[in-house]
Amino acid sequence: MAEVVNLEYLSEMHGFTVSEMLTRLHGRGVEVVNKWGRHWLVEAEVPPL
């Protein structure tokens, strides 16, 4: 089952902006869903940044 992670929270943890995180995750086979005005990362494991 895939894990759902709030991208804003993940960005803060790593010291990135959301747009920087989206750029880093782009093309890595990670699904990002925008719901309720927030970005959610859908992934079994968060890939190394």
Image (spheres, rainbow, N blue to C red):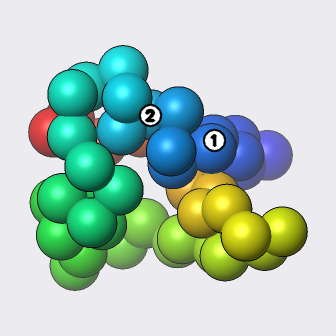
Q: Secondary structure at mark 2?
A: helix
* Residue 10 image label: 2
Q: Residue at x 37, y 29 (%)?
A: 12
Residue 10 shown left or right of residue 43 in the figure: left
Q: Nearer the viewer, residue 10 or 46?
A: 10
Contact between marks 2 and 1 (CB within 8 A): the answer is yes
**Residue at figure coordinates x 71%, y 46% from the top left:** 4
Dot 1 surroundings within 10 Å: few (below 14), some, or many (20 or more)?
A: some
Count every numbered label the image shows and give the total.
2
Disc on the earlier residue, 2 or 1? 1
Q: Quadrant of residue 37?
A: bottom right
The answer to whether residue 31 is left or right of residue 49 is right
Q: What percent of the width, then of the height, locates residue 25?
A: 26, 62
39 shown above or below 21: below
What x and y, as percent, mark residue 42? 62, 58
**What's under tag 2, amino acid-wise?**
Leu
Secondary structure of the residue carrying numbered label 1: strand
Task: Identify whether 14 is placed above or below 46.
Answer: above
Residue 31 against residue 5 in the figure, above or below: below
Q: Residues within 10 Å of mark 2 (few under 14, many from 20)?
A: some
* Label at residue 5: 1
